[in-house]
Image (cartoon, grey):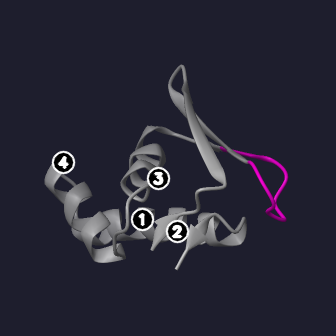
Amino acid sequence: MKLNDNFLTQEIDDAQVMVATGDVPFSGIVRSNETAAEIVNLMKQETTREEVIDKMCAKYDEPRESIAEDVDMVIATLRKVGALDE
């Protein structure tokens, strides 16, 4: 899976905003906190859920289950707005 090329991200202060460009049904802004932004950034290249979880586990000293829940939440949001190519 990979972030759809029709979605652009921009870091603003301590948050990331993502907007749709081009021909996609979503017309709005998705605002992410620092952790969600890291997950989104990892998904700018072709990856898997497990690879994202592994990379987040390597960076953060949190239980894998907790990190997996965060990753799943971000993936669900990206799917909901049509921002993932799968």
Q: Relative to the observer, which residue lies in front, 6 or 74?
A: 6
Residue occupying image coordinates x 69% and y 69% = 82
Q: Is residue 58 magenta?
A: no
Residue, disc 4? 59
Residue, disc 2? 75
Name the chief secondary structure element in magenta.
loop
Q: CA distance from mark 3 to mark 4?
A: 15 Å
Query: For mark 2, does the 10 Å Cα neighbourhood hold few (<14), some (14 to 19), or many (20 or more) residues?
Result: many
Q: CA distance from mark 3 to mark 2?
A: 8 Å
Callout 1 touching callout 4 (CB < 8 Å): no
- Counting residues from the N terminus, which is met first, the one under dot 3 or under dot 2? 3
- Counting residues from the N terminus, which is met first, the one under dot 1 or under dot 4? 4
Kind of residue at disc 3: Val
Residue occupying image coordinates x 43% and y 62% = 70
Residue 59 in the image: x percent, y percent?
Answer: 18, 48
Query: For mark 4, does the 10 Å Cα neighbourhood hold few (<14), some (14 to 19), or many (20 or more) residues?
Result: few
Residue, disc 3? 40
Kind of residue at disc 2: Ile
Query: For mark 3, does the 10 Å Cα neighbourhood hold few (<14), some (14 to 19), or many (20 or more) residues?
Result: many
- Counting residues from the N terminus, which is met first, the one under dot 3 or under dot 4? 3
Callout 2 touching callout 1 (CB < 8 Å): yes
SS at circle 1: helix
Q: CA distance from mark 1 to mark 4?
A: 14 Å
- Can you tell which mark lies on residue 71? 1
SS at circle 4: helix
SS at circle 3: helix
Q: Which residues are magenta?
A: 21-30
Point out the image quarter for the N terminus.
Answer: bottom left
Q: CA distance from mark 4 to mark 2?
A: 19 Å
- Compared across the picture, whether 51 is left or right of 17 comes to left
Residue 61 in the image: x percent, y percent?
Answer: 17, 51
